[in-house]
Amino acid sequence: MKQIVLYCLVGAINTFIGFGVIFTLMALGVIAEVANFIGYCVGIIVSFILNARFTFDARRNHAFLRFCLAMGISYLLNLLVLVVCYRVFSMNAYIAQIFSGVVYTTSGFLLSKYFVFKK
């Protein structure tokens, strides 16, 4: 339970930073998919640093490669939801970003816990 709480706290910080980048880029005219990609790249780096240190207490450098793979999978799921919501169902781009973020967060936690930082 402690890991879930810490993951959520780290996720809140990461989400604030990631969506800040995404929404700023969109406000500057960058298309939703490109803004999403850049924001998630920033988010992956922040998330690894904070989760490795605080959530999973991992000090192994090789975990970063597995973390990138796991977040890549989570990102593809996120992008799929974004495209379906925004392009197929014509949902507001900002709302679609939030829906896709929920998918990213859920899959990211599960992959982190059971694949990246498993003990």
Image (cartoon, helix red, strand yellow):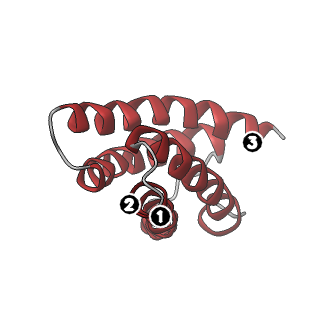
Secondary structure category for the residue under label 1? helix
- In the picture as drawn, the residue positioned furthest to the front comes out as 90
Q: Nearer the viewer, residue 44 or 94?
A: 94
Drawn side of residue 53 relative to residue 64, left or right = right
Q: Is residue 17 left or right of residue 24?
A: right
- The answer for how far apart the CA atoms under marks 1 and 2 are is 6 Å
Compared to residue 103, the image places residue 11 above or below, namely: above
Specify the quadrant of the image occupied by residue 6: top right
- Which mark is on residue 4? 3
Q: Are marks 1 and 2 in contact (CB under 8 Å)?
A: yes
- Quadrant (top left, top right, bottom left, bottom right) of the N terminus: top right
| Residue type, mark 1 in image | Val
User: Exactly how many numbered labels are in the figure?
Assistant: 3
Local crowd at mark 1 within 10 Å, few (<14), some, or many (≥20)? some
Up/down of 54 relative to 118, above or below: above
Residue most toward the right? 1
Give the residue type that dot 2 points to: Arg
Residue 115 % position (x, y): 64, 69
Quadrant of the image for the C terminus?
bottom right
Cα–Cα gap, marks 3 and 2: 32 Å
Point out residue 103 in the picture as x, y percentages from the top left corner: 59, 55
Left or right? Give the position of 65 relative to 6: left
Residue 84, numbered label: 1
Tell which of 106 and 2 is nearer to you: 106
Of residues 55 and 110, the one nearer the viewer is 110
Mark in front: 3 vs 2? 2
Secondary structure beneath label 3: helix
Residue at (58% x, 57% y) in the render: 108
Residue picked out by circle 2: 87
CB under 8 Å between discs 1 and 3: no
